[in-house]
């Protein structure tokens, strides 16, 4: 599902995580969309396991290809393979950026605690929310030293893809944010227990750098790169692997995929602060 500052009703979440090259570096991309509804202003909070500073240049324009995730996701059936992974590192420096992306106004920060009331006041009034100290502290406990995107909206938003690229802390593992919390975040001191969570997701992965292998999940569209906006097309591979969940009970966690394994595994793992 997703993390939001206040109660919300997300549905039909589509996530693509991939590996590609940009400026002669291996980077990871994350494309995310869902239908989401709330009363008044709210913010969806997306963490990134990024090594380097992120800014508006890390967001790709999907205005001319709003249906690309829907087209890819339509290919997959229900399936799941489980496992576990772990690693950690630290971020280099702090930065806060504010910009618009479709129906969302986004605050992108490399340190959640650096987001001040001055920053929040720059959000359109109808979208504004105030994060409690408890929410901020709990989020930083869950994802220590991770950049974060706060996507502010009001009311009901029909699915719009948000597309990001970033330099990963660990280039061998793709991250898909599926941890679910709306308003209240768990703490390590609460002796957090893995709870069942019903997913309404399609999760997809791919690489333009390496040949991935998975006998269960495969989608090949030789024309895809030519049908998608020129900025996004080069970031997407010809072959994409995916798994679809529809009201399927799984552990409330994020999903990781190890690119170096012989067969892809969609592996659940709690946020690093709860391990």
Image (tube, helix red, strand yellow):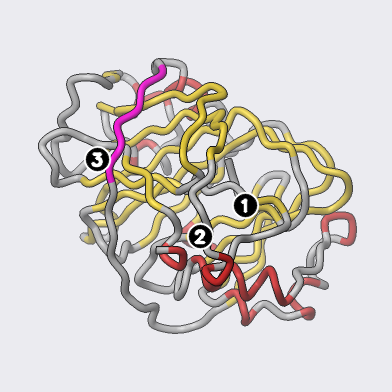
Q: Give SS at disc 1.
A: strand
Disc with the residue nearer the chain's start (3 vs 2): 2
Question: Where is 170 relative to 226, above or below?
Answer: below
Q: Give SS at disc 3.
A: strand
Disc with the residue nearer the chain's start (3 vs 1): 1
Residue wearing tag 3: 207
Circle 2/circle 1 CB separation < 8 Å: yes
Neighbour class for label 1 at 10 Å: few (<14), some, many (≥20)? many
- Residue 45, numbered label: none
Where are the magenta residues, as a range? 78-83
- In the rendering, at what x and y percent does residue 90 appear? 36, 78
Identify the image quadrant of the N terminus.
Answer: top right
Residue positioned 65% across, 65% down in the render: 107
Residue wearing tag 1: 3
Asked if one can make out residue 77 in the rendered structure from this viewpoint, the answer is yes
Taking the image as shown, residue 109 lies to the left or right of residue 119, namely left
- In the rendering, at what x and y percent does residue 112 appear? 60, 74
Q: Is residue 80 magenta?
A: yes
Closer to the camera: disc 2 or disc 1?
1
Residue wearing tag 2: 47
Calculate the distance from the C-alpha at mark 3 to the C-alpha at mark 1. 26 Å
Q: Is residue 73 magenta?
A: no
Question: Where is 194 relative to 168, above or below?
Answer: above
Question: Where is 204 relative to 19, above or below?
Answer: above
């Amino acid at each position: 599902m997703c993390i939001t500052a206040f109660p919300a009703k997300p549905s039909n979440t589509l996530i693509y995580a991939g590996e590609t090259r940009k400026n002669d570096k291996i980077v990871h991309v994350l494309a995310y969309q869902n239908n989401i509804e709330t009363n008044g202003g709210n913010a969806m909070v997306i963490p990134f396991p990024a090594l380097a500073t992120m800014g508006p240049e890390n967001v790709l324009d999907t205005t001319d290809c709003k249906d690309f995730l829907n087209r890819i996701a339509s290919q997959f059936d229900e399936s799941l393979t489980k496992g576990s992974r772990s690693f950690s590192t630290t971020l280099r420096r702090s930065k806060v950026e504010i910009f618009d992306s479709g129906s969302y106004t986004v605050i992108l920060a490399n340190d959640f605690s650096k987001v001040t009331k001055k920053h929040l006041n720059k959000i359109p009034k109808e979208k504004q929310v105030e994060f409690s100290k408890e929410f901020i502290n709990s989020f930083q406990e869950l994802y220590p030293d991770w950049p974060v995107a706060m996507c502010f909206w009001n009311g009901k938003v029909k699915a719009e893809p948000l597309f990001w690229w970033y330099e990963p802390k660990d280039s061998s593992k793709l991250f898909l944010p599926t941890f679910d919390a709306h308003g209240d975040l768990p703490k390590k001191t609460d002796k957090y227990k893995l709870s069942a969570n019903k997913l309404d997701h399609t999760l997809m992965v791919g690489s333009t750098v390496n040949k991935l292998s998975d006998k269960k999940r495969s989608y090949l569209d030789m024309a895809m790169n030519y049908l998608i906006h020129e900025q996004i097309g080069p970031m997407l591979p010809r072959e994409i692997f995916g798994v679809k969940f529809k009201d399927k009970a799984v552990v409330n966690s994020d999903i990781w995929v190890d690119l170096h394994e012989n067969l892809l595994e969609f592996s659940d793992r709690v946020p690093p602060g709860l391990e």
